Image: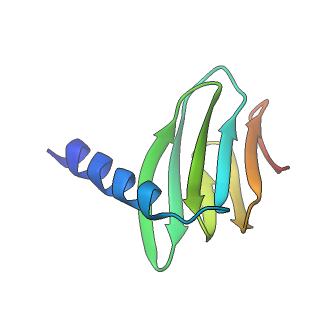
Amino acid sequence: MKRMLTLLVTLLFVQAAPAGAVSLRNRDAKPYNLIIHANGSRIRTSIQPNTRKEGVCRSCKIEVEGVGTVEASGSETVVIKEGKLQKE
């Protein structure tokens, strides 16, 4: 039940994100767990290998478990590559 609720909240959050929002790309061959910190809330989600999430947030802190944390806003793209975070 908790997993379904998390999925629902994540879907609503992603759909509510405006165009030109932050994107997240995982260029690694393994999935990662994420915590998105935005507007005073924390959303737990994940990203699969070699995929991209569009419209993550307008301005937020993205925490990738086991990798690190990065702040992003606007149309920035955050990339996970070789176990490290960077912005494009």
At horizontal 61% and vertical 69% (from top left) the residue drawn is 58
Q: Is residue 8 above or below residue 48?
A: below
Query: How many circles with numbers are drawn on the protein?
Result: 0
Residue 82 percent location from the top left of the image: 79, 30
At horizontal 63% and vertical 66% (from top left) the residue drawn is 61
At horizontal 61% and vertical 62% (from top left) the residue drawn is 19
Residue 48 sits in quarter:
top right
Q: Is residue 82 above or below residue 53?
A: above
Q: How is the image coloured?
A: rainbow
Q: Nearer the viewer, residue 75 or 2?
A: 75
Residue 44 percent location from the top left of the image: 42, 53
Q: Nearer the viewer, residue 39 or 2?
A: 39
Residue 74 percent location from the top left of the image: 72, 68
At horizontal 52% and vertical 72% (from top left) the residue drawn is 38
Extreme-top residue of the structure: 29
Extreme-right residue of the structure: 88
Residue 50 percent location from the top left of the image: 65, 25
Say which quadrant the N terminus sits in. top left
Is residue 9 toward the left or the right of residue 57 in the image? left
Extreme-left residue of the structure: 1
Q: Is residue 46 above or below residue 10?
A: above
Extreme-bottom residue of the structure: 40
